[in-house]
Image: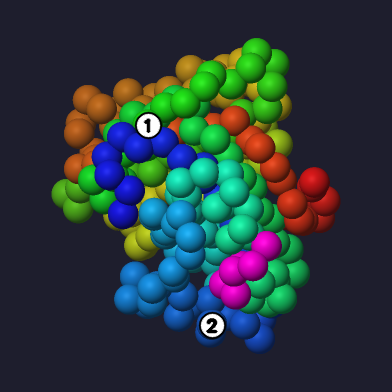
Amino acid sequence: MVPAGVAGTAMVLLADLRIAHWPWGWGRIAFSRWLPQPARGLRFIKTLGSGRDGGFGLLPSPSHQGLFCLFDNDDSANEFIVSSTLVDRYRQSSDDCLLLTLRPSTARGSWDRIAIAPGPSVAAGAPVAALTRASIRPLAAANFWRYAPAAQASLSGAPGCELAIGLGEAPLLRQATFSLWRDADAMDAYARSGAHQQAIRAAWQQRFFSESMFVRFAPLSLRGRWKGRDYG
């Protein structure tokens, strides 16, 4: 695992697996922590499930999955995308598969006690991506899920939101959201308004999370297809 505060290049893989490959995908989610994935420069990797249709609800999707990785640098991330048997398996097994490489810009918090150091700022007017994840305190789960649906339902329809998906390591308690935006102004307008602002305020006031992380990224490359749209 990468030491706390070390910068690098992130990779996000989003996949919509064909039905014949669902058992393989479920096995990845259930057992990936015990399945080493050696690769040059790979420091952190998480296999993530998703909500129904790649959304944010409590019902899990049998087909939608995500992969979040952190590498030492751009070369290691691109080498993994081109030559990894895991990435190739996702590509061959999916109707839609999108791969993004990203450079951290701002970051706060941690994931399994791992922090990502901030890097260069995203240029004004340039596309920006965001990853938000949290470990929800069990006694706070009911309150969290009272606020979450309204905030997350408004995300994919927010002006300037190009892509949004709900992700998670475990049902109910270890949740994440990944989104891609036209620019930082559009993302900030969503974050500071409506149901999302109410949910964030409640989360901090009522201490919903035992650990959380928010990272803003500058997208470096997008390759593949997601929900009928071609990228790259």
Identify the element where label 1 is drawn.
Answer: loop
Picture residue at 41% right of the left edge, 36% below the top: 7
Q: Quadrant of residue 163?
A: top right
Q: Earlier in the sequence, mark 2 or mark 1?
A: 2
The correct choice, above or below, for 225 with respect to 116 in the image is below
| Picture coordinates of residue 160, whole percent (x, y) | 70, 27
| Picture coordinates of residue 205, whole percent (x, y) | 22, 25
| Picture coordinates of residue 6, whole percent (x, y) | 35, 37
> Which mark lies nearer to you, 2 or 1?
1
Q: CA distance from mark 2 to mark 1?
A: 34 Å
Residue 117's mark? 1
Q: How many marks?
A: 2
Q: Amino acid at mark 2?
A: Trp
Residue 87's mark? none
Identify the element where label 2 is drawn.
Answer: helix
Q: Name the residue beneath numbered marker 2.
A: 24
Can I make out residue 58 in this image? Answer: no
Q: Nearer the viewer, residue 89 or 61?
A: 89
Picture residue at 52% right of the left edge, 22% below the top: 120
Most frequent secondary structure within the magenta stretch: helix
The correct choice, above or below, for 70 with respect to 94 in the image is above
| Picture coordinates of residue 9, whole percent (x, y) | 51, 42
Colouring scheme applied when the structure was drawn:
rainbow
Magenta includes 149?
no
